[in-house]
Image (spheres, grey):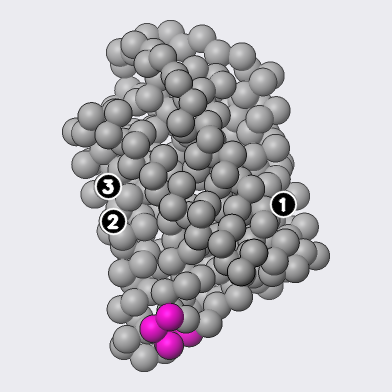
Amino acid sequence: MDITFIIVIFLIGFIGSFISGMVGIGGSIIKYPMLLYIPSMLGIAAFSSHEVAGISAVQVFFATIAGVWAYKSSGYLNMRLIAYMGGAILIGSLLGGYGSEFLTETQIDIVYAVLATIAVIMMFLPKKEVPFNPGDDLDFNGPLAAALAFITGAAAGIVGAAGAFILVPIMLVVLKIPTEVTIATSLAVTFISSIGTTIGKVATDQVLYGPAVIMIIASLIAAPLGAKAGQNMNTKILQWILALLILGTAIKIWTEIFM
């Protein structure tokens, strides 16, 4: 690894992790296409979809730890919701992370593009903001939350994501969770999901540890900064940032698949 390679991978990890901490996602929705296209475009590396998914899985694990830590005293981490969705998404992500070994590069990209497309459609659906103050009781459908988390975990585990980029719109639109609670709690659920995804990728030898370490260092620095910035931003702005990021990624991946 030369210095140019290290700098590029670090910047990808830093930018992606800052945005992920700000909008409450693990960051794979941003870093997957960045890792897939930018190093190749600059001529410093050409990662396969399997390698990108493996790097992303390990990086998301550490990024979400840092993000959750930044929200620990916010009052927006809902333990009951974390329990319902966390256990289900862990099982799903284990299955997806392990099973991805048997898929082709194109099949992994298609799974990613489908997830991104579903997420962006859900983000643009009309939703009513639910008022919430720290300490308020939170009503939601527990079995539905668990079922959706399991499905999300299985699909996201395939692409080395923890699924927050689709968990967030599910929590906002389907479960009708307040935005602040969604952003904070999705990071905790994403952390649990990343455990299963990382175990699956490591067990099937899909991780390049050099780039992964660089991404981890960048994540530990940038994710808390993004989380702090997110707590001081208008929730509507945060939702639009996430929606536009997902839309751009979905268009790019589908274009690559059919070109």
Position of residue 108 in the picture relative to residue 139 (left or right): right
Residue at left offset 32%, top offset 86%:
4
Is 43 included in the stretch rendered in magenta?
A: yes
| 167 w.r.t. 10: above or below | above
Depth check: 41 or 234 in front?
A: 41
Mark 2 or 1 closer to N-term? 1
Image mark for residue 222: 2
Position of residue 224 in the picture relative to residue 84 (left or right): left
**Secondary structure category for the residue under label 2:** helix
Q: Quadrant of the C terminus?
A: bottom right
Residue at left offset 55%, top offset 13%:
140
- Give the residue at mark 1: 96
Q: Amino acid at mark 2?
A: Ala
Say if residue 196 shows up in the picture: no
Is 90 included in the stretch rendered in magenta?
A: no
Q: Position of residue 187 (x, y in %)?
A: 44, 39
* Residue situated furthest front in the rendering: 259
Residue at left offset 67%, top offset 57%:
110
Q: Amino acid at mark 3?
A: Gly
- Give the residue at mark 3: 226
Q: Amino acid at mark 1?
A: Gly
Could you say which quadrant of the image residue 128 lies in?
Answer: top left
Q: Quadrant of the N terminus?
A: bottom left
Crowdedness of circle 3 by 10 Å Cα count: few (<14), some, many (20+)? many
Range of the magenta residues? Answer: 41-45
Depth check: 41 or 55 in front?
A: 41
